Image (spheres, helix red, strand yellow):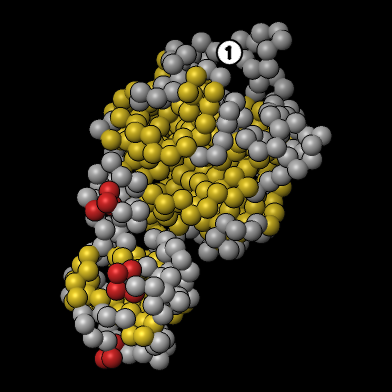
């Protein structure tokens, strides 16, 4: 993909909390067809009242219900959600008043019934930060402080050196340290990583430098050697995720020492390129993003984060000391089906009572590509049929032969702004209503493919003449 046009669509940004608590430090994951979000709830940024909240959504992040409140002996903070496919885990840190740290975990087999809090084994003195599972094995980049220096009157401590170590586990509870990833006076600490399909890793690592510049690291199994490069951006509380082969990062972006926003960057040639600034800011109570890849769409993500940019409903609650949790639904640009045949409008027809045999006047129509999007307000991948529709009511047909090769099953990702019936090889696979404007990847349909050529046909009502066109792409499963 070129980097001179928008490579994403923000579907929504939702506020999940609005109360008198300090809500912060988030994680999110999909499990058993539901979306889960976790965060710390406390009275202040640092206090011994901290507990972990787990929320569940069964409508793709629109509404949530609370399914767990978890706590260890001390302030329990920085929660993270992850799954091995069979069990849902929430990890977090206990932070004692004398700056002793204990990593722990709880789990659930159904997302509703949870174990108690369990401190992990094999990671003494390490903060086990955002574990992940790949191919049935558990991995984590934990960090450790080498001596703690307390200054009277300051809420936080200082340290002269830290290290980040690589841990592996068979169950997420009993860990084995494999080796040091990075250590030194640059104070490496919080790390967020993602796996490529072949098991190789991309990781972002926060550092305590005055410049606030993180490291980008890469490694391959057995994760003994790590390539490192400093990123030229001031970023704390970092997150990282992979979209295809591309690396995306986010965090608390420092425009100045006192002005921040939650920003999203794409890594291009080891350089962070700003793509999006989320509603956020302006101080230090923002970021700590969680990342959840949609189970049916590898290019659609839910991103949780916290921010203090909106005031609580209660005017007696201070906005800047009581941040809230937010959730972004975002899709990243993909390669769409581009070359179509489109029929003339069948006036006064409906998508249900009109057949493709009635369609005439077929002509070629191409989806907007990288060069064409600069000449229109329609986005990349959109198949625009407004000149054919011409504000008239009726039905229009789109058809295309799709070469899929030797695959048996896949997913159709569609967007449309009129009522549609979708047929694949003559069989109806989807029927739904649509409203203007169309959004890419609005729906995902599991389908059975034939080896080789498959015929895709979409009948679309023009929504009183207001419809404009479609998005369509597929992927193998």
**Rendered view: 322 above or below 38:** above
Q: Residue at x 47, y 37 (%)?
A: 277
Q: From this viewpoint, which residue is outermost toward the right?
A: 316
Q: Residue at x 28, y 30 (%)?
A: 270
From the viewer's perspective, is residue 85 above or below residue 237? below
Viewer-nearest residue: 413 or 140 = 413
The residue positioned 28% from the left and 91% from the top of the image is 358
- Relative image position of residue 35 (x, y in whole percent): 56, 57
- Residue extending farthest to the top is 152
Residue 233 in sight here: yes
How many other residues sit within 10 Å of disc 1, few (<14), some (14-19) or many (≥20)? Answer: some
Observer able to see residue 473: no
Q: Is residue 92 left or right of residue 249?
A: right
Viewer-nearest residue: 477 or 285: 285
Query: Residue 273 lies in what quarter of the image?
Result: top left
- Give the residue drawn at x 45%, y 76%: 464
Quick check: 239 above or below 382? above
The answer to whether residue 319 is left or right of residue 436 is right
Give the percent coordinates (x, y) of residue 149. Answer: 61, 10
* Residue 381 image offset from top left, x and y in percent: 30, 59
The quarter of the picture where the C terminus appears is: bottom left
Callout 1: SS: loop
Q: How many marks?
A: 1
Q: In which image quadrant can residue 452 be found?
A: bottom left
Residue 191, given in percent of the width and then of the height, sits at: 45, 32
Which of the 4 image quarters holds residue 415? bottom left
Locate residue 28 relative to residue 463 in the image: left or right: right
Residue under pointer 1: 158
């Amino acid at each position: 993909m070129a980097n001179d046009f928008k490579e994403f669509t923000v579907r929504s940004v939702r506020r999940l909390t609005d109360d008198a608590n300090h809500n912060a430090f988030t994680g999110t994951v999909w499990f058993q067809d539901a979306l889960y979000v976790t965060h710390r709830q406390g009275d202040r940024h640092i206090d011994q009242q901290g507990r972990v909240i787990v929320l569940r959504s069964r409508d793709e992040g629109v509404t949530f219900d609370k399914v767990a409140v978890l706590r260890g002996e001390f302030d329990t903070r920085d929660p993270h959600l992850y799954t091995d496919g069979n069990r849902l885990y929430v990890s977090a840190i206990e932070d004692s008043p004398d700056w002793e740290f204990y990593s722990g975990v709880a789990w659930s087999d159904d997302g509703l019934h949870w174990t108690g809090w369990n401190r992990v084994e094999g990671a003494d003195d390490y903060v086990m930060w955002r574990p992940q599972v790949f191919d049935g094995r558990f991995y984590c980049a934990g960090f450790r402080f080498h001596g703690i220096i307390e200054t009277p009157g300051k809420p936080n401590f200082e340290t002269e050196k830290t290290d980040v170590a690589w841990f592996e586990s068979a169950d997420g509870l009993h860990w084995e340290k494999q080796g040091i990833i990075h250590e030194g006076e640059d104070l490496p600490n919080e790390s967020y990583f993602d796996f490529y399909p072949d098991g190789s890793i991309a990781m972002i690592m926060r550092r305590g430098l005055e410049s606030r510049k993180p490291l980008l690291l890469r490694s391959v199994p057995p994760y003994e050697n790590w390539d490192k490069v400093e990123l030229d951006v001031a970023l704390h509380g970092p997150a990282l995720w992979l979209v295809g082969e591309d690396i995306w990062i986010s965090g608390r972006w420092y425009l100045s020492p006192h002005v921040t926003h939650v920003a999203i960057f794409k890594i291009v040639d080891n350089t962070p390129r700003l793509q999006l600034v989320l509603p956020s800011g302006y101080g230090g109570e923002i970021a700590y993003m969680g990342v959840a890849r949609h189970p049916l769409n590898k290019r659609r993500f839910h991103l949780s984060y916290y921010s203090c940019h909106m005031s609580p409903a209660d005017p007696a609650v201070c906005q800047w000391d009581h941040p809230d949790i937010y959730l972004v639904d975002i899709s990243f640009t993909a390669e769409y089906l581009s070359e179509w045949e489109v029929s003339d409008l069948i006036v006064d027809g409906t998508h249900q009572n009109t057949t493709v045999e009635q369609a005439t006047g077929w002509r070629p129509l191409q989806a907007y590509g990288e060069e064409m999007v600069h000449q229109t307000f329609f986005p990349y991948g959109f198949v625009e049929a407004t000149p054919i529709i011409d504000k008239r009511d009726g039905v229009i047909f789109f058809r295309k032969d799709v070469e899929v090769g030797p695959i048996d099953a896949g997913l159709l990702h569609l967007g449309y702004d009129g009522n549609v019936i979708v047929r694949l090889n003559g069989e109806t696979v989807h029927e739904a209503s649509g409203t203007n404007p169309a959004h890419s990847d609005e729906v995902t349909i599991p389908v059975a493919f034939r080896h080789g050529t498959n015929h895709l046909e979409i009948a679309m009502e023009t929504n009183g003449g207001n419809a404009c066109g479609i998005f369509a792409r597929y992927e193998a499963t």
